[in-house]
Image: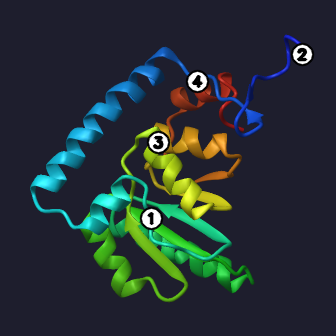
Amino acid sequence: MASPSAPAQDAQYNCPAIPVTALERLYGALAQGAFVVALLAAKLRGASASELNSRTGLMPEGEAPLLWFHGASAGEMAAAISLVGVLRNRGFHFTAGYTVTNQAGLEYLATAGGSGQIAALAPFDVSSWIGRALDGWRPVALFLIETELWPGLILETHRRGVPIFSVSSRIYRRDMRKMKSNGNVS
C-alpha cells in the first residue's frame, strides 16, 4: 500500500496520475457529447471515410519510432516541419506523424511535408478516440504546436507515459502559477 504522501498511480499505465478537477471532469463529459454531434455533422456534410476515421482515432499507419506533431493549421505545421528538419539534421531518425484540425493544414503538409511523414486530421478530444490514436501510432513523444492544448489529448498521452512538449506556446503567468501548484508542469 502506498504511503499517504506518495503520488497516486494510474493503474492501467503504471504512471503518476494527474489530479483531475471537477471542471476537467465536466469538460470530458460535455466534450464527448459535443464531439459526437460534430462527427455526425461532418458525416451529414459528406466528410470522407478518411476524415471520419481520423476524427475517431483511426489513424493512418506509421512506422516506429514515431513523433506526433499536432497543430491547428498550416502555420503551425510550418513550424512543425522546421522542428522535424532540425531534429533530422541532428541525426534523429523517425516518422513524423502530423495532425491538424482542418483541411488547410493537410493541404499544406501534402505540398511541404516531405518524406517520412504521415498526416491526418486530429482526433476529436474524446478520451476513447484519443486513446485509439495513441494505441495505433504509439508515439515516443507528442509535440503540441503553439496553443493546441487539448485536455483529453494531454491526459491520455500522459497516462501512457509519453513525453509531451509544448512548442512555441504562450502561457500566462497566472496560469503557470496554477499549473505549477497542481504539479502538472515542471
> Disc 4 or disc 2, which is closer to the eye?
2
Q: Which residue is mark 4?
A: 178
> In the rendered structure, which amino acid carries the disc numbered 4?
Lys
Whole-Å distance between the Cαs marked 1 and 3? 13 Å
x, y (%) of residue 21?
A: 53, 18
Q: Which of the two labelled residues, at mark 3 and mark 4, occupies the earlier sequence position? A: 3
Q: Secondary structure at mark 4?
A: helix
Q: Are marks 1 and 4 in contact (CB under 8 Å)?
A: no
Name the residue located 44 percent from the left edge and 19 percent from the top edge: 23
Whole-Å distance between the Cαs marked 4 and 2? 30 Å
Nearest the viewer among 141 and 46 is 46
The answer to whether residue 167 of the structure is visible from this angle is no
Which label was assigned to residue 128?
3
Q: Are marks 4 and 2 in contact (CB under 8 Å)?
A: no
Tell me, what colour scheme is on the image? rainbow
Whole-Å distance between the Cαs marked 2 and 1? 39 Å
Which label was assigned to residue 39?
none
Q: Are marks 1 and 3 in contact (CB under 8 Å)?
A: no
> In the rendered structure, which amino acid carries the disc numbered 1?
Met
Which label was assigned to residue 1?
2
> In the rendered structure, which amino acid carries the disc numbered 3?
Ser
Q: Which of the two labelled residues, at mark 2 and mark 1, occupies the earlier sequence position? A: 2
Q: Quadrant of the C terminus?
A: top right
Q: Residues within 10 Å of mark 2 (few under 14, many from 20)?
A: few
Q: Quadrant of the N terminus?
A: top right
Whether residue 23 is situated above or below residue 140 in the rendered picture: above
Nearest the viewer among 108 and 29 is 29
Would residue 179 appear left or right of 168 to someone viewing this image?
right
